[in-house]
């Protein structure tokens, strides 16, 4: 009688380096840019990460959006004012070998369909530098947004995507890379009433974009770095999203995860609904956009009035919130992924993205135990899910033993 082997397959757990933006002081890293990456690899090992998502961004002196206008300022841990070369790459790769921490992918989170042609070209050129850096560092992918041309409707943006973004994917293909899109709708990117400012914000949209890419021979370059916090923000649940992709024949699209939750504020939701705060935010003065860039961060009240980002492990265990899609049930998240998606789980990255404001301290000694605890929580939850999946889907069926109960169901109301 076949017994079935118990062979759980956990994922590699990592962290996005934007969690600590200035681990290396600016006065040191500007003159020695790769020092920031070396020190982050050491810090990642200290907090127990298997891998990092290496954050790249336009240098603060070159960025078109001031840091004070951002909800979660990006980090140029990977400084690409000068292009990556083999000498720089070898130095970084030596640090990965010394620390035992891998680079899962290189991330540049910006609006690649920006409506200003000059700004768009600048971002595209930087993304190409990011591509080249990923190749030299041996990373299989880059991660970023698609974005949106705010002067056009979302439907019209599909044309813009085909004309502008598909050629970018052709550049990725030429380098042997995939582009993992992040699905945040980015409501605070603009001061108007638009909520969906990144057109790759939901599964049905991913499929539309993939079909365009596939027609142009770059479908294999478009994948999704799924983040459940954005699903909660939009009233969706992860299991149903994964089921939808499977039902439509696109379960292969998700290629990695951001491990970041969302905790819905019932009072804020009662006041504003899932569209978020639309007036009295503070980003306008006397009916016009405030001249103070710091005030523009208030546009993010479209989101923050109704919810708050969760660092995995920091939110209370709340079964009712899980069942009503007002927080992420991490165990079911990892189970649903294994049950419904077509992924190589032992290779796909599980990246902790730290954006829980009150705990987003920027002092290494204080942040280290916070990240260490969150990474350990994430690892243990994934290990539990891997064990449950192996037991229920491999061992028991091999012996003809039924699985108990019903479990969570997709699309359930």
Image (tube, grey):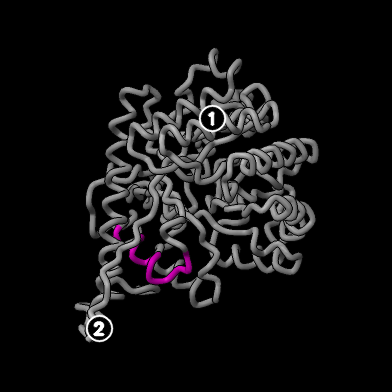
Label 2 SS: loop
Residue 224 falls left or right of residue 151 = left
Q: Is residue 216 above or below residue 367?
A: below
Which mark is first along the chain, 1 or 2? 2
Which residue is found at the position 50% from the left and 42% from the top?
103
Label 1 SS: loop
Q: Residues within 10 Å of mark 2 (few under 14, many from 20)?
A: few
Residue 307 in the image, given as x and y percentages of width and height: 39, 46
- Please tell me which residue lies in front, 332 or 217: 217
Residue 307 falls left or right of residue 186 = left
Q: Disc 2 marks which residue?
A: 2
- Please tell me which residue lies in front, 242 or 273: 242
- Going by the picture, which residue comes out furthest to the top? 27
Residue 46 in the image, given as x and y percentages of width and height: 34, 31
Which residue is found at the position 38% from the left and 67% from the top?
338
Q: Quadrant of the N terminus?
A: bottom left
- Please tell me which residue lies in front, 337 or 6: 6
Residue 303 falls left or right of residue 1 = right
Q: Which residues are magenta?
A: 331-343
Q: Quadrant of the C terminus?
A: bottom left
- Mark 2 or 1: in front is 2
Q: Is residue 131 magenta?
A: no
- Main secondary-structure element of the magenta-colored stretch: helix
The quadrant where residue 330 appears: bottom left
Q: Is any part of residue 194 visible from this angle?
A: no
Q: Is any part of residue 254 visible from this angle?
A: yes
Q: Residues within 10 Å of mark 1 (few under 14, many from 20)?
A: many
Which residue is found at the position 37% from the left and 34% from the top?
45
Q: Disc 1 marks which residue?
A: 77
Task: Give the CA distance from mark 2 to mark 1.
Answer: 51 Å
Residue 334 in the image, given as x and y percentages of width and height: 35, 60
Which residue is found at the position 53% from the left and 35% from the top?
93
């Amino acid at each position: 009688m076949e017994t079935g082997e118990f062979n759980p397959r956990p994922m590699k757990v990592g962290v996005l380096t934007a969690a600590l933006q200035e681990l290396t002081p600016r006065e040191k890293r500007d003159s020695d840019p790769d020092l920031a990456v070396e020190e982050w690899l050491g810090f990642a090992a200290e907090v127990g990460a298997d891998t990092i998502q290496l954050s790249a961004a336009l240098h603060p002196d070159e960025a078109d959006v001031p840091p004070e206008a951002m909800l979660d300022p990006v980090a140029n841990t990977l400084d690409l004012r000068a292009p990556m070369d083999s000498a720089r790459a070898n130095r970084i790769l030596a640090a990965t070998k010394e620390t035992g921490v891998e680079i899962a992918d290189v991330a540049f989170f910006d609006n690649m369909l920006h409506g200003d042609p000059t700004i768009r070209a600048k971002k595209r050129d930087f993304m190409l530098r990011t591509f080249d850096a990923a190749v030299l560092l041996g990373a299989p992918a880059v991660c970023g947004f698609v974005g949106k041309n705010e002067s056009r409707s979302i439907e019209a943006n599909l044309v813009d995507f085909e004309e502008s973004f598909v050629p970018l994917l052709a550049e990725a293909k030429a380098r042997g890379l995939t582009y993992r899109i992040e699905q945040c709708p980015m409501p605070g990117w603009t001061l108007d009433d638009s909520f969906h400012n990144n057109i790759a914000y939901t599964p049905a949209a991913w499929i539309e974009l993939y079909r365009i890419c596939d027609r142009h021979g770059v479908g294999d370059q478009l994948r999704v770095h799924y983040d459940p916090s954005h699903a909660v923000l939009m009233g969706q649940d992860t299991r149903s999203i994964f089921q939808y992709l499977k039902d439509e024949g696109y379960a292969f699209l998700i290629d990695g995860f951001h491990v970041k939750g969302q905790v819905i504020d019932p009072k804020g939701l009662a006041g504003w609904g899932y569209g978020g705060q639309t007036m009295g935010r503070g980003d306008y003065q006397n009916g016009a956009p405030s001249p103070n860039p710091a005030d523009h961060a208030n546009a993010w009240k479209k989101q923050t009035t109704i919810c708050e980002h969760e660092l995995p492990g920091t939110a209370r265990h709340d079964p009712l919130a899980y069942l009503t899609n007002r927080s992420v049930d991490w165990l079911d998240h990892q189970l649903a992924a294994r049950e419904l998606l077509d992924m190589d789980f032992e290779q796909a990255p599980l990246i902790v993205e730290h954006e829980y404001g009150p705990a987003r301290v920027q002092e290494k000694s204080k942040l280290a135990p916070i990240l260490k605890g969150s990474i350990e929580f994430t690892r243990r939850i994934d290990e539990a899910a891997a064990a449950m999946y192996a037991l229920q889907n491999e061992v028991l069926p091999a012996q003809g033993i039924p699985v108990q109960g019903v479990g969570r169901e997709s699309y359930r109301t």
